[in-house]
Amino acid sequence: MTVLQLSLDLSSADATRQLAMRIGTTLTPGDVVLLEGPIGAGKTHFARSLIQSLLPIVEDVPSPTFTLVQVYDGPKSEIWHADLYRLSAPDEVVELGLTDAFEEAICLVEWPDRLAELQPENALTLSFALAEEEDRRQLTLSATAPRWSDLFESLSE
């Protein structure tokens, strides 16, 4: 199994937004994006930017920290934004309907470690890390599914 990996330096919140919009254009129903990183690393900002770029009419995209899941009607499919921080067991993910959404929606999942063995093998993983400067972020993208190779190639240019 080949592991695709790419590291990027995001110099500002706007750079994160631009990357989210770019990745958003490549997503199709059944795509899962796993967002890793500490609190304040930019996961929700990335997800909010990506979701807003896909909606036909821009709307408020709140963090799903307390609701656990927010669902949006996108032009291609539903868009699910999940924050699993407060979950304690993978079976709670099934109760939310998230595993079904992995098959038919575009899913953005914060705190994907809570999925344990339920993590989809074809997912794109984005690992955010805080950098020394306040607005900078280090981002590592990784995937094993060949489906993501074109994205990695375009981002490497």
Image (cartoon, grey):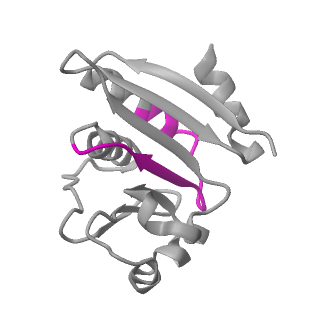
| Magenta-drawn stretch contains 36 | yes
Of 13 and 91, the residue lying toward us: 91
Q: Please name the residue shown 18% across and 68% down the image.
A: 66
Q: Which quadrant would residue 95 be assigned to in this image? A: bottom left
Of 38 and 143, the residue lying toward us: 38
Magenta part of the protein: which range?
Answer: 20-39
Q: Is residue 3 above or below residue 105?
A: above
**Count of numbered tags:** 0
Left or right, 149 with reference to 60: right
Where residue 25 sits: x, y (%)? 52, 39
Location of the C terminus (image quadrant): top right
Where residue 20 sits: x, y (%)? 41, 35
Q: Please name the residue shown 33% across and 75% down the image.
A: 88
Of 82 and 30, the residue lying toward us: 82
Q: Please name the residue shown 18% across and 20% down the image.
A: 134
Where residue 102 sits: x, y (%)? 55, 68
Q: Is residue 111 above or below residue 21?
A: below
Q: Please name the residue shown 36% across and 50% down the image.
A: 56
| Magenta-drawn stretch contains 128 | no
Q: Is residue 155 above or below residue 65?
A: above
**Which residue is outermost to the right?**
1
